Amino acid sequence: MLRRLPFLLLGLTAICLVVATIVEKISGSDAALSFVYRSPWMISLWTVTAIASAAELIARRRAMGSGSFMLHLALLLILAGAAITHFLGEHGYITLEAGGPEVTEWTLSSGETKKLPFAISLADCGVEYHPSAIAVRDYFSVVRAGDMEARISMNHILDYQGYRFTQASLGDGRSTLSVSHDPVGRGVTFAAYALLFLSMVMVLLRGKRFRSLIRKVAAPLLILLPSIAIAQPKTLQKPLARTFGELYVESGGRICPAQTVAREFCVKIHGRDSYRGLTAEQVLTGWIYYYDEWKHEPFIRLTSREARGLVGKDRVALTELFTREGYILEPLLRGPAVSRDLLADDEKVTFISAVVAGRLPRLAGDGDFSLVRLREDVSADIAAGRFNSANSRLKELRSLQASVSSGSLPSETVMRAEHIYNGSCYPLVAAIVAFAGGFAGALGFRRTAVAAGTVTGIYITYILILRWIIGGHIPLATGYETMLSMAWFATVVGLAVAGRMPVVLPMGLLVSGASMMVAMMSSRNPAVSPLVPVLASRLLSLHVMLVMCSYALFAIIALNSAAGLAGRGRTDISRLMLYPALFLLGAGIFVGAIWADRSWGRYWGWDPKETWALVTFIVYAFPLHDTTFKVFRSDRFLNIYLILSFLSVLMTYFGVNYLLGGLHSYGAS
């Protein structure tokens, strides 16, 4: 019982953390911090857990390998650092005025003021934009502290005499900086992070149990698991519409080809990137130049139950939504509880109205008189049927955009990459190939699975590279990109171990296919857009990559465990993969903490996603301690446990975004 006490206390702590996220959702962050996270009883629970764990670690130090001992010691040191930060660390803010007097006091979180050992003043502050002059690139402050001058911006802090200044907000020539003074607690915690990384590598390279599992599962083993022609609405010919698609337009805070907006228009309103054999550019130009025909087309796909029930079908024409009484969705929108789907349906009508009224797409450089006049000439040519002339004027229009928007337009390489991406982004097809390969591998068709995995892996790599070129950053910033990266990793893992552990390949392909399907469902319109300034960090990209890789492995483990319950999976493979999966999650959590320290001025803040990631780490740590809990030696129990544990992964990734919110939610779209 004494050996199990630390784990029982840790399990109780995890339950309390889950309760805290619910309290935060109902009563707010301050209530959760006061009544749970920073409450005396929670601190006491952490303290007792740490003492019991330290006693058990000392008692079993000779029986543990050096890597395992260092790993548990690192976790205890992380708790120690957190305790020092809580009791001795100071956090608050300071507000400076550009050109104003020096300030020597700062305000603590408690509301009291405290002296700084030096004076600080604001020389300048402002906002930097991307070349498009639309989306924000960064927020910055130039300060003078003591005898030095430094620039503070998102992900670039000032560390001076033990005080750390982080950009918090700007406005009216004022800059508010977050201030933290925690040299001891932060030092202990970051040293513990380094020890944790080293110990995890040692366990994977020299751990006896992990190496024995590799030898055990290395033996090869396979598990048995006409189109109809219809009259089309009037629109531009495909070559002319393609020329229109090459114009520079503003969308989503950046400048992109009109083709991208056309594709977004189709996907958002119709649910597909084409309509009755017409390209997205033909659809958009059809609405712009031939509205009287297109308003009768059943182009709008209704998603809300209320709207579908009202009109009796799911695809309607714009004219069907407007009667003599007015806009038929308006009474529904005035109801007491308006669903998200109904708002989305209303947004589709708004999108069409903006296109028809000429507000969208907005041409880059549209304020130039020559450009406006040339655009009117294009419309006149199309109305008169002078399509060759319209094509020439559209090309002239694009050249004029380049001259009047010098320096703010993306390069031809980026534009070409986006055109290629728009014409070749078909995650549904890739998901089907991955699913087919996964099921084929489960039925024993190994070559088919390898071929499907190779095609899927190459395709996802190709798409990720294109998004990297277009966005100018590693494609790990949005929910769509992270799920696509998870699909890539699951495919690569399956192919990498297919020779020695063929059971993993079909699992990896099924996870890959599911990830791509989730990416499509969570983002029907996966536009590439500039990063929010706080997200522009290599540390953040590494954090997301590590966490998503761990989630992919946990998904494969869950599938293998489900197959194990059916007598077709190998539990020893789940045991083996649990080590890298858990360690990747741990590394991801603590790399995220390092990034948060540089971005938010603190390495841990009990944000709901942070909390649930820690809960997931605790949940998956239990099966690795089967010497203490012999029940985990039972294959059946372990399979059931690992299947249920995956619910915590789903909650961490999806549930927090949609149910709890928090600072991490801006990466969801």
Image (cartoon, grey):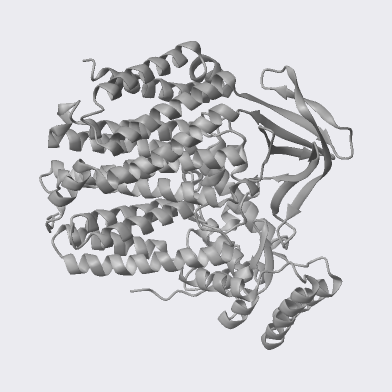
* Residue 142 x, y percent position in the rendering: 79, 44
Q: Measuring 56% from the left and 80% from the top, which residue is drawn there?
A: 238
Q: How many labels does the image show?
A: 0
Q: In the image shown, does 3 or 35 lie closer to the viewer?
A: 3
Give residue 447's quadrant in the image: bottom left
Q: Residue at x 34, y 52 (%)?
A: 514
The structure residue drawn at horizontal position 37% and vertical position 59%, both measured from the top left corner, is 488
Is residue 387 visible from the viewing direction of this image?
yes
Residue 624 figure quarter: top left
Q: Look at the picture and state if 378 lies above or below 81.
A: below
Looking at the image, the residue that sits furthest to the front is 62
Q: Is residue 138 left or right of residue 48?
A: right
Residue 630, image x, y percentages: 15, 27
Find the residue positioned furthest to the left.
Answer: 567
Quadrant of the snapshot with the N terminus? top left
Please tell me which residue lies in front, 94 or 613: 94
Any part of residue 265 in sight: no
Above or below residue 644? Residue 300 is below
Horizontal and vertical percent for residue 176?
75, 34
Of residues 625 and 464, the one drawn nearer to the viewer in this rendering: 625
Residue drawn 28% across and 37% down? 66
Measured as percent of width and height from the top left, residue 166 is found at 68, 38
Q: Is residue 176 above or below residue 507?
A: above
